[in-house]
């Protein structure tokens, strides 16, 4: 499928490592130019270099929930590569573990700001800046944690449930020229998810029919499909990518 995104530009948030970087690698391999965001400039610079340098990728460091940062990201895509055709809202945080009864409400508010409101705001900005006139495709990276109770990461799951609704609502508002879908991974082996599997990977993977946890490439391939014209009649969909764990099993 090399070249299917030739001439198109993708913005990917939270892309200096893990799932975000895996998505960036796949899109560049398929011909896209990419603009990456992350909080820390040094890992972002390393990611840009790994993707082939400034002819293929640019990095914009900043907080994803900062509207001025978002505006800079969209402007960078258009100024550097001439368009902002694709958006992947991948950045997310999980600052608190456990259930809701002892939840730190300030941490909960921050979780919703980053995992939900930042995505809405960035969609607004890229829509105004490019997609309203030229069309485009968007993928939100959600989680199977948003499908039902997950006491180990309850607030994170609640925020992803909200993101699922946001995806479906925006599909109605953005059509017909802009599509938006969400991908819902189960446990993927990244630094972000180590709380869920580190030191017990085999046990965690046991309920999965495919008997393994995910890797970033598993998610990247599905995201690339959802952004491509192969998914041209899909919008508002919540696509679970989970090694089969939600088929009659607990999600986490």
Image (tube, rainbow, N blue to C red):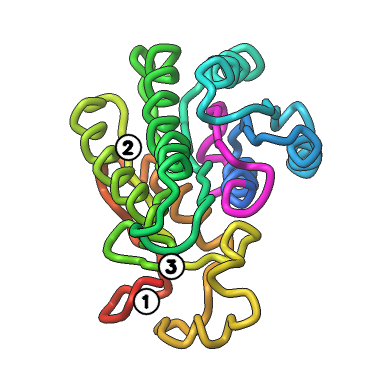
Look at the numbered discs 3 and 1 and tell me whether their residues touch, using CB distance below 8 Å: no
Distance CA(mark 3)–CA(mark 2): 29 Å
Magenta highlight on residue 91: no
Look at the numbered discs 3 and 2 and tell me whether their residues touch, using CB distance below 8 Å: no
Give the mark, 1 or 2, whose residue is nearer the N terminus: 2
Work out whether 9 lies above or below 68: below
Q: In which quarter of the image is residue 35?
A: top right
Magenta span: 1-20
**What residue appears at the point 27 percent right and 64 percent down from the top-left corner?**
148
**What residue appears at the point 50 percent right and 82 percent down from the top-left corner?**
205
Determine which residue is flagged by label 1: 245
Q: Can residue 227 be seen in this view?
A: no
**What residue appears at the point 55 percent right and 15 percent down from the top-left corner?**
68
Residue nearer the viewer, 66 or 228: 66
Q: What element carries label 3?
A: loop
How many numbered callouts?
Answer: 3
Determine which residue is flagged by label 2: 180
Judge from the rendering whether residue 175 lies leftward or rightward of residue 158; answer left or right.
left
């Amino acid at each position: 499928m090399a070249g299917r995104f030739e001439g198109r530009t993708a913005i990917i948030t939270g892309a200096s490592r893990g799932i975000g970087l895996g998505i960036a690698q796949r899109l560049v391999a398929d011909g896209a130019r990419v603009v990456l965001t992350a909080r820390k400039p040094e890992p972002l610079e390393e990611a840009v270099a790994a993707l082939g340098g400034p002819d293929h990728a640019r990095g914009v460091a900043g907080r994803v929930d900062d509207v001025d940062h978002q505006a800079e990201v969209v402007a960078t895509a258009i100024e550097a590569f001439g368009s902002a055709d694709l958006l992947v809202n991948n950045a997310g945080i999980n600052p608190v573990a456990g259930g809701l009864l002892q939840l730190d409400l300030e941490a909960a508010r921050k979780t919703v700001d980053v995992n939900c409101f930042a995505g809405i705001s960035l969609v607004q900005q890229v829509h105004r800046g490019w997609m309203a006139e030229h069309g485009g495709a968007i993928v939100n990276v959600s989680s199977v944690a948003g499908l039902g109770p997950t006491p180990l990461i309850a607030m994170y799951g609640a925020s992803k449930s909200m993101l699922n609704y946001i995806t479906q609502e925006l599909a109605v508002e953005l059509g017909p020229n802009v599509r938006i879908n969400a991908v819902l991974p189960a446990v993927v082996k990244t630094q972000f998810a180590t709380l869920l599997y580190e030191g017990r990977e085999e046990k965690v993977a046991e309920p999965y029919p495919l008997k393994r946890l995910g890797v970033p490439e598993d998610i990247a391939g599905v995201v690339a499909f959802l952004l491509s014209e192969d998914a041209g009649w899909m919008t508002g969909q919540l696509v679970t990518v989970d090694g089969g764990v939600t088929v009659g099993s607990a999600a986490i």
